Amino acid sequence: MKNNGERSLWARVEPLLLKCERPTRYIDSEFGAVHDPDASYRFVLIYPDVYEVGLPNQGHAILYRIINSMDGACAERAYVPWTDMAQCMREENIPLYSLESFEPLLNSDVVGFTLQHELCYTNILEALDLAGIPFLAKDRADDCPLVVAGGPVVYNCEPMAPVFDAVMVGEGEEVITEFVHTHMEMRDKGCTRAQIVRELANIPGVYVPSLYDEEPGSNPTIVHPAVDGVPAVVEKRVLANFDEQSPQAIPIVPFGELVHDRLAVEILRGCSRGCRFCQAGMTYRPVRERPADSIVAATLDGLERTGYDEVSLTSLSSTDHSQIEEVLRRLDAAVDGKGVQVSLPSQRLDGFGVKMAHLAAGSKKGGLTFAPEAGTQRLRDIINKNVTEDDLFEAISAAFDAGWRRLKLYFMLGLPFETDEDVLGIVSLANRAYAYAKDCVPDKERGNVRLTISCSIFVPKPQTPFQWCGQVTMEEAQRKVDLIRNGHLHKGIDFNWHDPRTSLIEGVFSRGGRELYPLVQRAWENGCTFDAWSDKFDMDSWMSAADELGIDMQQIASKEFEIGAPLPWDHISAGVNQKFLALEYKRARNGELTPDCTFESCTGCGVCQDLGVDISLGGSRG
């Protein structure tokens, strides 16, 4: 571990805490935190948001546990200080530090960022600036920490590629140990930074951007290997023995309230329902389950260790677990009378999903959420949602018969092949759902029925069948919002919608290449941070940055790609082959459905074959 003589910053940080809101964001010694001052290798995990948003992240908890179990290595944590603390740190010349040791990040061996969404990019630069680490990989000296990344957005990380020494693609449980072992060994041999990153590129699933050259004249930028031996396509890593891993990494219990303040137990990974807009549904394949015995034991153990009174059984589609009813009944019996609530973050849009939600919620019935995604059956077939209005009304009937009185429906606006009739179909469906829900309850309770509809703006994502589509303009998105606002929704229905401006920024960085990094840096220089926070998002600063650089953000987001044309993310693979994605796009145009392969035959997406996954093992439902 490097040491620049500034061993502990606590004495300088402590006086600042009274000047900042939520000082528990910046202190240490929570229950479950690991301290290893004797470790010779320090890997700092950074979630690029504030403490209460980043601490609940399951990926961080898993990596924290794994690294801290390795001989000679320790994992520590850092988060992005809120604007008040950041100002104080700059005024007092205090660098960004890790919580466990209060050591400057500049003293660590690796600084690892989670790329959770595109709106976190300016926060990554904010963290590096506070840490005193050069933004660009090419500008870092040999004794500077490696700056690496992983997470959901790595499937097109090109707008931030110049920042990272390495990017880990896919599931991190195995690749992280290989990465740390390789780096420790080469560091101890005195290897240069260039030698280290070249060796790291030999690890399957590790992408080293500096070893790939930009294709001259390409717009958006396309890259190819610049040195021999580097893979033309970096394939994602898939955990081989998912069902043998613990469903939960014992979390760090915070001093203050978190955004998701509960025990999280991962019961299922992947989803093969095949929604054509859903990046997670494509990139987290194949579907693998954990056994009921393992889930129940880990849940009860975690509740006892942490003292939480709520547990969330997490996955992309928790009610799809083949043993979910058994799991819920066993947990219900085990926690009966203890004041513990079991929650499911996602429900199937049918009566079974409601039945499972009822088992989880018991008498504590807040709101229930379903996602029809589109207002007409035509558009639901285009996006391969595989649900009907009958499914929705069956679920509403089951929910309100079981005691629910509040319901939220999620929709998207700006989907491929969408018409105004589809948009107004949201109004029609919502009104009918509200009336039907009121008919399901006694007359005296009808006044308690509330329905909320929430609309997000569709963003075409890499590695999906809609990756070739353009995004609707901000003006068109707002027009669609106004169609609903003026569409005579019943007064008992609340309507929320996502800001089309933030959706534009998300779309720009979903679809662009390395040519967009200067836009991130200029926006940060203009004061942009915490872009995912509505009260901090500053569209004027983003537009000013784009104008200064001559970048047309709307043109980038709305650009349509021809099938077969080079894409900025072609050198990163989630395992789903391009032929399958192109076929799914063709089926979308024709309104054809593709079944879920875990309940019917293989659909030929290529994940199991191309990544060598044996789905007869590892707890698969297949």
Image (cartoon, grey):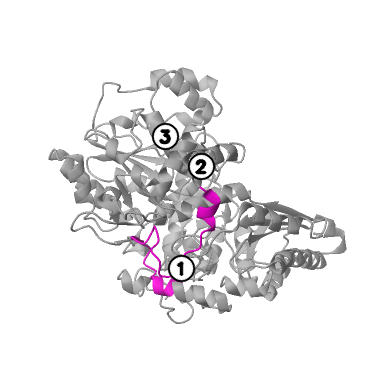
Looking at the image, is mark 2 or mark 1 earlier in the sequence?
Answer: 2
Q: Look at mark 1 in the image and give the residue it sits on.
A: 562
State the extent of the magenta-drawn residues as a range.
Answer: 552-581
Disc 1 crowd rating (10 Å Cα; few below 14, some 14-19, many 20+) is few
Q: Look at mark 2 in the image and give the residue it sits on.
A: 546
Disc 2 crowd rating (10 Å Cα; few below 14, some 14-19, many 20+) is some
Q: Nearer the viewer, mark 3 or mark 2?
A: 2
The quadrant holding residue 203 is: bottom left
Chief secondary structure of the magenta span? loop
The kind of secondary structure element at disc 2 is helix
Q: Nearer the viewer, residue 70 or 59?
A: 59
Q: Nearer the viewer, mark 1 or mark 3?
A: 1
At 61% from the left and 68% from the top, the residue drawn is 353
At 56% from the left and 57% from the top, the residue drawn is 345
The kind of secondary structure element at disc 1 is loop
Q: Where in the figure is residue 89, as x and y percent of width and height? A: 44, 23
Q: Residue furthest right?
A: 443
Q: Residue furthest bottom?
A: 601
Looking at the image, is mark 1 or mark 3 earlier in the sequence?
Answer: 3
Q: Which mark is residue 127?
A: 3
**Figure quadrant of the C terminus:** bottom left
The kind of secondary structure element at disc 3 is helix
Asked whether, in this view, residue 257 is left or right of residue 26, the answer is right
Residue 363 visible in the current orientation: no
